[in-house]
Amino acid sequence: MTLIDTIKKSNNEGRLCLVTYVTAGDPDISTSYKILESLSNNGADIIELGIPFSDPISDGPTIQKASERALSNKMTIPIALDMIKKFRRSYQTPIIVFGYFNPFLQYGLKKVMKDIRKVGAEGVLIVDLPPEESFETQLAADYAGLELVYLLAPTSTKERIGIVSKLSNSFIYLVSVTGVTGVRKKLDKNLQSFVANIKQKTNKPVCVGFGLSGPAHVKQLKTKCDGIVIGSAIISIIENNLKKKDQIVSKISNFISKIKKSTFI
């Protein structure tokens, strides 16, 4: 099932699509795989699997530390792809490979897109890829049969919004705040109007992420967008339980179950 079809299916069931993010290899490779299973088993509609990078400029301290832990565990693109391949043998939850442009470029754009699709992932999100410079990457993704997800932020110009709406063959990821990823207590007061503005300018599904941390945030967006992305809140559970790794999976399971319940409109 495509990412767009997954979102539409969720909406037809009377709820927001639940997109979750985790960093491959955090806190270790074995536990990381169990977290993937847990996300799928507890209601994630789509999973973003992050490829760790040494200079994650769009990420706040929480996900930066997750990348550091994953890199210390020798996580690489091939190992992450092996995780997806193993996961796909038992689970059908769509996966987006989330990363930065430089590791993909070093791997080879055409090859990485081909290999990502080969192991069963449905999409790619390159967080630092400007849509104005995405032609070659979009071609490689299209050729491989992948959906390329683009980001829009509160600072995006009318021109960029138009470009993304035209280029995108997937949903549009709306960054809820100006700045980096991370858990926030309150959503920006202008977020709902920003989402409404984007919805007026595109017929693509819109999912909101960056800073969403619990059911209260989800409830504020119920009738405004098509899906929500939860990432830093999951990574925080990992970070807060590094000395009790045997509890990480169960705590994430409980958290995702609560988020899932809050997605119903």
Image: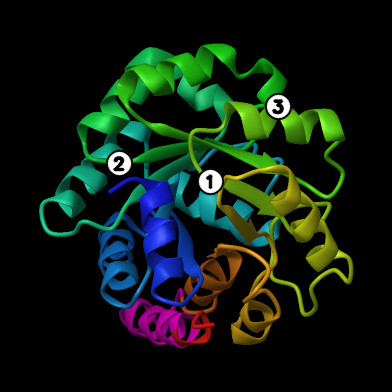
Q: Quadrant of the C terminus?
A: bottom right
Assign a secondary structure to mark 2: loop
Of the numbered discs 1 and 2, the one sitting upstream in the chain is 2
Assign a secondary structure to mark 3: helix
Name the kind of residue labelled 1 in the image.
Phe
| Residue 143: image location, x then y, percent | 35, 17
| Residue 208: image location, x then y, percent | 64, 60
Mark 2 vs mark 3: give the one in front.
Answer: 3
Q: Is residue 108 visible in this depiction of the protein?
A: no
The residue carrying mark 2 is: 121
- Which residue does the image show at 79% across and 73% down from the upper left? 187
The residue carrying mark 1 is: 171
Q: Is residue 262 visible in this depiction of the protein?
A: yes
Q: Are marks 1 and 2 in contact (CB under 8 Å)?
A: no
**From what the image shows, is residue 66 above or below residue 250?**
above
| Residue 15: image location, x then y, percent | 48, 76
Q: Which stretch did the figure color magenta?
A: 242-260
122 vs 52, left or right, is left
Q: Which mark is residue 91?
A: none
How many numbered dots are placed on residues in this image?
3
The residue carrying mark 3 is: 163
| Residue 54: image location, x then y, percent | 58, 37
Q: Residues within 10 Å of mark 3 (few under 14, many from 20)?
A: few
Name the kind of residue labelled 2 in the image.
Ala
Query: In the picture, residue 47 is in which quadrant?
Result: bottom left
Assign a secondary structure to mark 1: loop
Query: In the picture, residue 231 is in which quadrant?
Result: bottom right
- Which residue does the image show at 57% across and 45% down from the upper left? 204
**From what the image shows, is residue 46 above or below residue 54?**
below
Q: Determine if the magenta segment contains residue 195.
A: no
- Which residue does the image show at 75% across and 73% down from the upper left? 184
